[in-house]
Amino acid sequence: MQKTFIIFFGPPGSGKGTQAAKLAAKIKLPLVSTGDLLRQEISKESELGKIARKYMDAGKLVPDELLEELVSRRLKKPDAAAGVIFDGYPRNGEQQEFLLGKLKVAIRNGAKILGILVDVSDEQVIERIGGRRACLCGAVYHVTFNPPKAEGICDRDGKKLFIRDDDKPDVVRDRLKTYHKQSRGMFDYWEKSGKLLKIDGGQPIDKVWEEIEGKLESRINLE
Ligand code: AMP
C-alpha cells in the first residue's frame, strides 16, 4: 500500500479513538495516540510523564515540546515506515506545523495524507464522557454504548478499568473550550486542500465506521 498518514480530529469523547483503532486494524498501520503515549509515560514515571501529568489532570494541553519529543520518537520506530494513524495529534496550529514539517519529505515522495473529522456536539460529548471507562493498555469502553464483557474489567488484558481524571465533568468543559479555541483553526489547511473527510460522530459506533469506510474507499485502498 502507498505510504499513508491519516489524522483523526474531533472533540474529546467524539469516539475518534475507537474509530482510529478500527481503521488501524483494518489497514494494518500503527495507531499513534498521543494521549496513550502520555499515559504510558506517566505510568513509567518518566520525567516527561511527571511534567505531562500536571497538565493532563487539569484538562490542559501538554506543552508542544514534549509532544514533539514523543511524536519524533514514535515516528522513528520501524513500524511507522509504511505510515501511521494519528489520534489526538496535532491539537493546535503549532503541532500541525511541526507534523507537516516532519512528513514533508514523505508527502513530496507521494505519501497519502488525509484528515478525518469525527464531529459531535458539546452536549453529546458531556453525556458520553460521563460513561467512559479506560484501561492503561489503551482500550476505551462506555458503560452503555460500548460496555466490556465483564463490568469494570478490560476485555483485552483483564485489568481493572478506571475513570480518567480528565474525564471529570468540570475538566471536560475546560477540554471542550480548549478544543474549540485551538483545534478548529487547523481545519482550514485540510479543507482548502480537499483532504478533510467530515463524519457525523453523533451516530452509533457501527454507523460512524460505515461512513468512514464509505468516504475513505475512493481515497485509499482499504483491502
Ligand atoms: P486524549 O487521550 O487524546 O483525550 O488526551 C488526554 C490528555 O492528554 C489531553 O487532555 C491532554 O492533556 C494530553 N494530550 C494528548 N494529546 C495531546 C496533544 N497532541 N497536545 C497536548 N496535549 C495532549
Image (cartoon, helix red, strand yellow):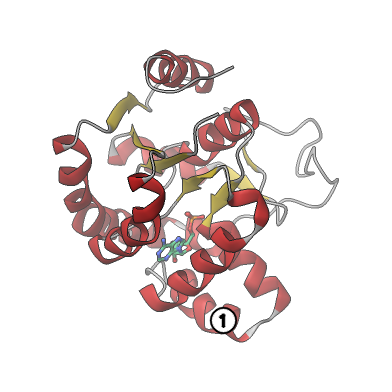
Q: Is residue 105 above or below residue 37?
A: above
Position of residue 94 relative to residue 90, above or below, is below
x 23%, y 59%: residue: 182
Question: Where 49 sits versus 18, above or below?
Answer: below
Q: Residue at x 51, y 77 (%)?
A: 52
User: Residue flagged by tag 1: what amino acid is it?
Assistant: Leu
Q: Is residue 11 visible?
A: no
Horizontal and vertical percent position of residue 159: 82, 51
Quarter of the view holding residue 141? top right
Question: Residue, x 37% and y 54% (percent of image)?
Answer: 105
Q: Residue at x 43, y 21 (%)?
A: 212
The answer to whether residue 174 is left or right of residue 141 is left
Of residue 222 and residue 149, the one placed in the foreground of this image is 222
Q: Quadrant of ligand 1?
A: bottom left
Horizontal side of residue 162 vs 157, given as left or right: left
Residue 152 lies, in percent from the top left, at: 75, 44
Residue denoted by label 1:
48
Where does residue 110 sit, x and y in percent of width and height? Answer: 38, 38
Residue 217 screen position, x and y as percent: 43, 15
